[in-house]
Amino acid sequence: MRTFLDVFTRASLDWNDLRIVRDATRLPILLKGILHADDARRALDEGIDGIIVSNHGGRQVDGAIASLDALPTIVDAVAGRVPVLLDSGIRGGADVFKALALGATAVLIGRPYCYALAIVGERGVREVIQNFVADFDLTMGLAGCASLGEIGLESVPRS
């Protein structure tokens, strides 16, 4: 527990730490936890290769903006320069559809596959992915979309 707290509650982390990571690898760097357009723009200025919109499942800051609500302004700020992935709250194909309609390049499905892996193992993960695909396919059909390219803002009415 101490190691977790030392790493994940380090208030001293700042944008300069990204340079250390960049110097240590030639791999693409995706920055997770972006919830504000200004941070997305700063991440681009720092040379980030992708952005993961996430409120960390609401565990880090109680009452933080929902990742899905933050997504559209971040997509606008990034303007296609890097991939924007959505994490947090993806529990089925309809959630994937909404995220793509709001501009996400892709989604992360941490909890569902982790639960499946813990309970059933590899077969469980395979079934979760198959269920996501089936649910996504059904959602696309019900929304009148025959291809990914047809999914857009008009596909998800917003109040």
Image: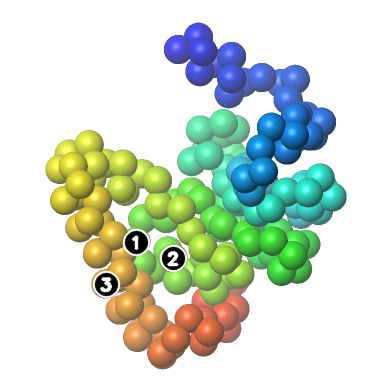
Kindly identify the amino acid type of the residue bearing the numbered disc 2: Val
Figure coloring: rainbow
Quadrant of residue 134 within the rendered picture: bottom left
| Disc 2 to disc 3, C-alpha distance | 12 Å
Q: Is residue 101 above or below residue 41?
A: below
Q: Residue furthest front?
A: 26
Q: Quadrant of the N terminus?
A: top left
Considering only order in the chain, which callout, 3 or 2, is on the residue closer to the N terminus?
2
Quick check: 118 left or right of 93? left
Considering only order in the chain, which callout, 1 or 3, is on the residue closer to the N terminus?
1
Callout 1: SS: loop
Residue marked by disc 1: 92
Kindly identify the amino acid type of the residue bearing the numbered disc 1: Gly
Of 52 and 88, which appears nearest the observer? 52
| Label placed on residue 96 | 2
Residue 14: image x %, image y %? Answer: 78, 29
Q: Are marks 1 and 2 in contact (CB under 8 Å)?
A: yes
Give the residue drawn at x 66%, y 19%: 10
Q: Which class describes the residues within 10 Å of circle 2: few (<14), some (14-19), or many (20+)? A: many
Of 74 and 121, which appears nearest the observer? 121
Residue marked by disc 3: 134
Residue 19: image x %, image y %? Answer: 78, 34
Kindly identify the amino acid type of the residue bearing the numbered disc 3: Ala
Give the residue drawn at x 44%, y 65%: 96
Q: Quadrant of the C terminus?
A: bottom right
Residue 138: image x %, image y %? Answer: 30, 79
Is there any visible trace of residue 74 in the rendered image?
yes
